[in-house]
Amino acid sequence: MSNILSIQGTIRPAEAADFETVRQITRTTIEAVYPQYYPAGAVAFFLAHHNDAAIRNDILENRVFLYISDDGQAAGTVTVHDNDIGRLFVLPGFQGRGFGKALLDFAENCVSERFSEIFLDASWPAKGLYLKRGYQPESYHVIETENGDFLCFDTMKKQIL
């Protein structure tokens, strides 16, 4: 896939050398945002789920993309695997400036090249955004995590027209 230019930067495929950047965006965003919505055990689950091996594997499989701002800073990341969008994170300092929308637009475009529907797992912080974008809850999940905490999320689906 070629690079996609946006108003504020470029979305490009992540390379092996970008592992630490993708890891840092993922961990920093989870650690800054998720404790406002989830108990400690659920936050720890998210961090373990988005572990180094998973990130490395997705990069090697050409599934990970980085948003690089006009000033050269890595602002966010998204992972696209077949018709599933995952690991969509924007660093807290870049949130509210359209980076997440641009990453989601990009990911949806990637999926629409081969599929007629998109699936994603929606965390509580992102669920409102996905609803506004036309995603509908497909199923609801509850996972018991450390200390008897629970992680609740929806799997959502969007039909591509």
Image (cartoon, helix red, strand yellow):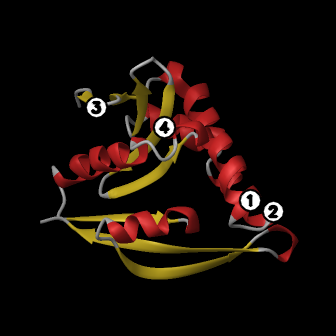
Q: CA distance from mark 3 to mark 1?
A: 31 Å
**How many C-alpha atoms fall within 10 Å of the one at disc 4: few (<14), some, or many (≥20)?**
many
Quadrant into which the N terminus falls? top left
Which of marks 1 and 3 precedes in the sequence?
3
- In the rendered image, residue 102, in percent from the top left (x then y), is placed at 33, 43
Q: CA distance from mark 1 to mark 2?
A: 7 Å
> Which element is circle 3 on?
loop
Q: Residue at x 47, y 49 (%)?
A: 88
Q: Are marks 3 and 1 in contact (CB under 8 Å)?
A: no
Q: Which residue is mark 3?
A: 7
Q: Are marks 1 and 2 in contact (CB under 8 Å)?
A: yes
Q: Nearer the viewer, mark 2 or mark 3?
A: 3
Work out whether 140 lies above or below 118. below
Q: 15 or 24: which is nearer to us? A: 24
- In the rendered image, residue 119, in percent from the top left (x then y), is placed at 35, 65
Which of marks 4 and 1 precedes in the sequence?
1
Mark linked to residue 35? 1
Quadrant into which the C terminus falls? bottom left
Mark linked to residue 40? 2
Work out whether 15 lies above or below 30. above
Q: CA distance from mark 4 to mark 2?
A: 23 Å
- In the rendered image, residue 143, in percent from the top left (x then y), is placed at 67, 75
> Which element is circle 4 on?
strand
Q: Nearer the viewer, mark 3 or mark 1?
A: 3
Q: Amino acid at mark 4?
A: Gly
